[in-house]
Amino acid sequence: MHFGERIRELRESQGLLQRQLAANLEIDTPMFSKIERGERKAKRDQVLKIAGLLKTNEQELLALWLADQIKELVTDEDQALQALKIAEQDINQANTK
Amino acid sequence: MHFGERIRELRESQGLLQRQLAANLEIDTPMFSKIERGERKAKRDQVLKIAGLLKTNEQELLALWLADQIKELVTDEDQALQALKIAEQDINQANTK
DNA sequence: TATGACTTGTCAATATTTGGCTAATATAAG
DNA sequence: CTTATATTAGCCAAATATTGACAAGTCATA
């Protein structure tokens, strides 16, 4: 489940149209469509606005949005999983220190 | 241990100078210095060249280089670890499918 | 002081990202 | 079949980020 899929689910379950959310984000409908399909990446502040508009958890959407970017970064890399492990260790290290 | 630290270790243990490696990469010494200190990010093909010049494992360096970028992407995000988990799951999913 | 290795700060060139526009497609109603 | 509305596709310009070069600085040592 990527970010776009999730916001589409939420949007449709609430009977909202792309153009309504797009208007609130001050972008046009084609751009919003691209974000939902994962063709374009939302900006961080757009994620927060979307969470507000869809009355959902900011944390969940931010996590999906970040995960999309991580996946994008490591796709086609043989060392993808190894790199994730290293990053995780380093972050944990930093947190406990 | 980030990418720059590792290549500095390797370079110094082999008695090489920044300007020697920089010349081989066709960048100037200040740029190489910045890469070692993590102030600038190497490009992927530079990572491979560096591995060759330092006679070391491409995989190890690529993993560190990717990990740096992942960390950069998620620093200051509360959902960093959660996002890493999601990305890991999705990648494993894709691999087994 | 003088030299060599490395670092810092700034700038221009380049590349990437973002968003808007127009047109195309799909779906549903009359 | 036509119309109306929603969504998607493709292209282009504006904004932003990245890359590398250059000049000047620090630091250590002879």
Image: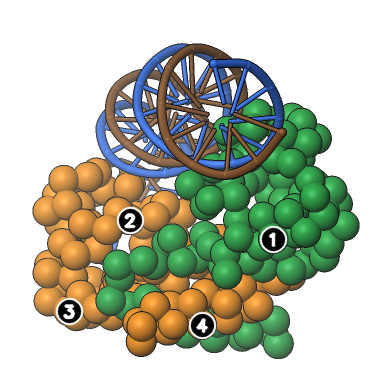
Chain colours: A orange, B green, C blue, D brown
Determine which residue is flagged by label 3.
Answer: A56
Same subunit, tags 1 and 4: no
Front disc: 3 or 1: 1
Determine which residue is flagged by label 1.
Answer: B9
Q: Chain of mark 4?
A: A
Lower sequence index among marks 4 and 2? 2
Point out residue A88 in the picture as x, y percentages from the top left corner. Answer: 49, 80
Q: CA distance from mark 3 to mark 1?
A: 47 Å
From the viewer's perspective, is residue B27 above or below residue B76? above
Front disc: 4 or 2: 4
Q: CA distance from mark 2 to mark 1?
A: 39 Å
Lower sequence index among marks 2 and 3? 2
* Amino acid type shown at disc 2: Ala
Q: Chain of mark 2?
A: A
Determine which residue is flagged by label 4.
Answer: A89
Dot 3: element: loop
Q: Quadrant of residue A62?
A: bottom left
Q: Chain of mark 3?
A: A
Front disc: 1 or 4: 1
Point out residue C6 in the picture as x, y percentages from the top left corner. Answer: 59, 41
Q: CA distance from mark 2 to mark 3?
A: 16 Å
Measuring 15% from the left and 62% from the top, which residue is drawn there?
A: A49
Q: Are marks 3 and 1 in contact (CB under 8 Å)?
A: no
Dot 2: element: loop
Determine which residue is flagged by label 2.
Answer: A42
